[in-house]
Amino acid sequence: MIADYNDRFGANHSINEFDLYYQDVQKRIKDQQYPNQDLPHAQKIDIVIVVDMLLTGFDSKYLNTLYVDKNLRYHGLIQAFSRTNRVLNDTKPYGNILDFRQQQETVDTAIGLFSGQTTKPPKEIWLVDKAPAVIGKLQTAVQSLSDFMQSQGLDNKPEQVPNLKGDAARSQFINLFKEVQRFKTQLDQYTDLTDDNRQTIEQVLPREQLQGFKGVYLETAQRLKEKQDKGGDQTGPEVQQLDFEFVLFASSLIDYDYIMALIARYSQQEPSKQKMNREQLIGLIQSDAKFMDERDDITGYISTLEAGKGLDEKAIRTGFERFKTEKNVRELTVIAEKHGLNPIALQAFVDGILRRMVFDGDQLSDLFAPLELGWKARTKAKLALMEDLIPLLHKLAQGREISGLGAYEQ
């Protein structure tokens, strides 16, 4: 088996160093992130046959189906089933279990003990509803959203959401639409939907309206999340208690490569022959949580493109990187001028942070040395600069942690 593995993946494992082989297998299961920047698909593992290993203590959010052909009981059953319980995105909000041993009674017993539910039937705890029941819940959730919008004197349309007044109303929209999206995400998992089911879902929540609401949800959520992160007495309890569940709004089908390809196609087609116009393309990007940090850059870049110009995907990618770089330089120049700093010195300061992913407070002080400020004035000036600089640093870090930056985020 190990020899076959070595031949398939170009490895050099042996039975005498089993742990190294075992760790390699786990890595190939876990490293599934598209668009294959970490590991090409040919180097990954899609299915694994196990006896005991990987049933406990193993965690991969990409694992979505467990095929059970083994009698399991109590904590062993719960642990094995839990291998699939990591949420990934809107295409995997939960896992699937295919049980070939017809163990429903054993599952009921284990779930009942694990959940501590003695009065509620275990099946109601762990077994999902049939599609028509979930469609009914979706209808109720959509109606609740509509009633709320009408109570605010607004039509139940995406374009009306920015007209909500106050954080309390915006927070209520977040909670209500999140419930709508949760049921829609759940319905997307069903493989046995009938044509009537699909038609009913489309009538309850038309696709175009759903995409519009997702876009405005992410925009509203991003603003409230910034307030939540800052905290303070001015942030009301309704904002502090929000859970945005961005994972429900990130599609694995719409990744960076897909968007770049769409933009290239948009650039190559004459306006009269386009299947997706500029506004639809921007709407698609704005409705996916994966692009929250880059949505303004991507939409800004699309706005600069001329339809029918005929750029290929490579040119689109190169142009987008250049667009981002130029935009970041402009933003940094504005910040430098606002705080009386030399733009070149500030750019060098930021480049140094991103190169090492370390924030150096001494270098921040050196940045203000030419201004010859007193201790109090310099401290005030540094804090004012960091308030403007931190969002840009997070954006440029692209999810990576900058060591030492947390001291300025309190």
Image (cartoon, rainbow, N blue to C red):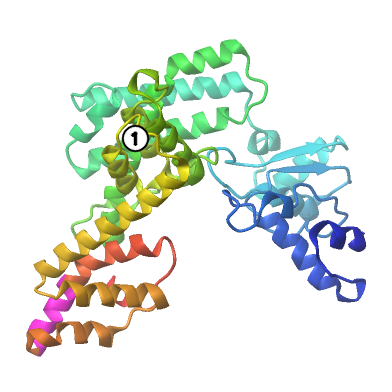
In the image, what residue type sits under mark 1? Ile
Q: Height in image: 278 above or below 201? A: below
Where's the N terminus, which quadrant?
A: bottom right
x, y (%) of residue 184? Answer: 50, 29
Left or right, 354 with respect to 339, comes to right
| Residue 395 found in image quarter | bottom left
Determine the secondary structure under disc 1.
helix
| Residue 401 found in image quarter | bottom left
- Dot 1 surroundings within 10 Å: few (below 14), some, or many (20 or more)? many
Question: Residues in magenta?
Answer: 375-384
Left or right, 345 with respect to 244, comes to left
Q: Is 245 covered by the magenta stretch?
A: no
For the residue pair 140 and 361, the one nearer the viewer reads as 361
Q: Height in image: 139 above or below 124? A: above
For the residue pair 280 and 172, the one nearer the viewer reads as 280
Where's the C terminus, which quadrant?
A: bottom left
For the residue pair 351 and 118, the one nearer the viewer reads as 351
Residue in the picture at 83% in, 56% down: 8
